[in-house]
């Protein structure tokens, strides 16, 4: 059954578009470990199997880049990721907040919790990851983004 995400996940639907920003990685003690620019494409699709698509492109000042794609299914008021990179899900908390939890396939015994806050007009958002390995918080990632294309 095709889902209209504006109805079933209205907060997620507000993230549809292209976003640019910066990721800053902090140790659990607050020291800056890394930072890079980001360009994310977030799309609600017409595909029944994968109604959500995301492409992340990261660029460091030294010229390094990384790009990957994520596809998500919909189940019980969540989008669910099961890719070569991550497994996890995303759900809505209130009119401005998405929560995610996931594991990285390439980092054994790791898991992540993320909170995303979008503003009222849906043109800026702030994200925070809590990154755990072996049940110990090892990093926090703070992300600030601006929507450049709807």
Image (cartoon, helix red, strand yellow):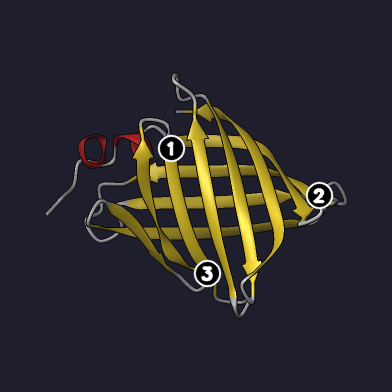
Residue nearest the viewer, comparing 143 with 30: 30
Classify mark 2: helix, strand or loop.
Answer: loop
Q: Which residue is drawn at 76% across and 57% down?
A: 28
Sequence order check: which comes first, mark 3 or mark 1? 1
Give the Cα distance between marks 2 and 3.
Answer: 23 Å
Q: Residue at x 56, y 35 (%)?
A: 19
- On screen, residue 57 above or below 122: below
Residue indicated by mark 3: 103
State the image quarter where residue 124 is shown.
top right
Depicted 12 relative to depicted 70: above or below: above
Q: Which of 41 and 7 is in front in this view?
A: 7
Residue extending farthest bottom: 108
Whole-number angstrom distance, CA of label 2 to CA of label 1:
24 Å
Label 2 close to label 3 by CB (< 8 Å): no
- Using a 10 Å C-alpha cutoff, classify the residue at mark 2 as few (fewer than 14 neighbours), some (14 to 19) or many (20 or more): few
Q: Give the Cα separation between the discs numbered 3 and 1.
A: 20 Å
In the rendered structure, the answer to whether residue 12 lies left or right of residue 85 reads left
Q: Where is residue 71 in the image (x, y as percent from the top left)?
A: 40, 59
What residue sits 44% from the left and 20% below the top?
Answer: 120
At which x and y percent is residue 109? 60, 79
Q: Which residue lies furthest to the top in this view?
A: 121
Mark 2 or mark 1: name the one nearer the start of the chain.
Answer: 2
Residue 17: percent from the left, percent from the top?
46, 35
Residue 105, percent from left and from top: 55, 76
Which of label 2 and label 1 is nearer to you? 2
Q: Mark 1 points at which residue?
A: 97
Quadrant position of residue 39: top right
Q: Do the residues under discs 3 and 1 have CB atoms within 8 angstroms?
A: no
Residue under pointer 2:
30
């Amino acid at each position: 059954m095709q889902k209209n995400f504006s109805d079933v996940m209205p907060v997620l639907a507000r993230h549809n578009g292209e976003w640019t920003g910066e990721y800053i990685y902090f140790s659990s003690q607050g020291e800056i470990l890394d930072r890079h620019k980001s360009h994310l494409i977030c799309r609600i699709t017409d595909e029944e199997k994968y109604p959500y698509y995301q492409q992340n492109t990261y660029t460091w000042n030294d010229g390094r880049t990384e790009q990957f794609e994520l596809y998500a299914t919909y189940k019980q008021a969540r989008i669910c990721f099961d890719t070569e990179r991550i497994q996890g899900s995303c759900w809505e908390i209130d009119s401005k907040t998405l929560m995610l939890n996931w594991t990285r396939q390439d980092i054994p015994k790791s898991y992540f919790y993320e909170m995303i806050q979008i503003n009222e007009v849906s043109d800026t958002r702030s994200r925070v990851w809590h990154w755990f390995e072996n049940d110990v918080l090892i990093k926090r990632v703070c992300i600030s983004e601006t929507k450049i294309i709807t």
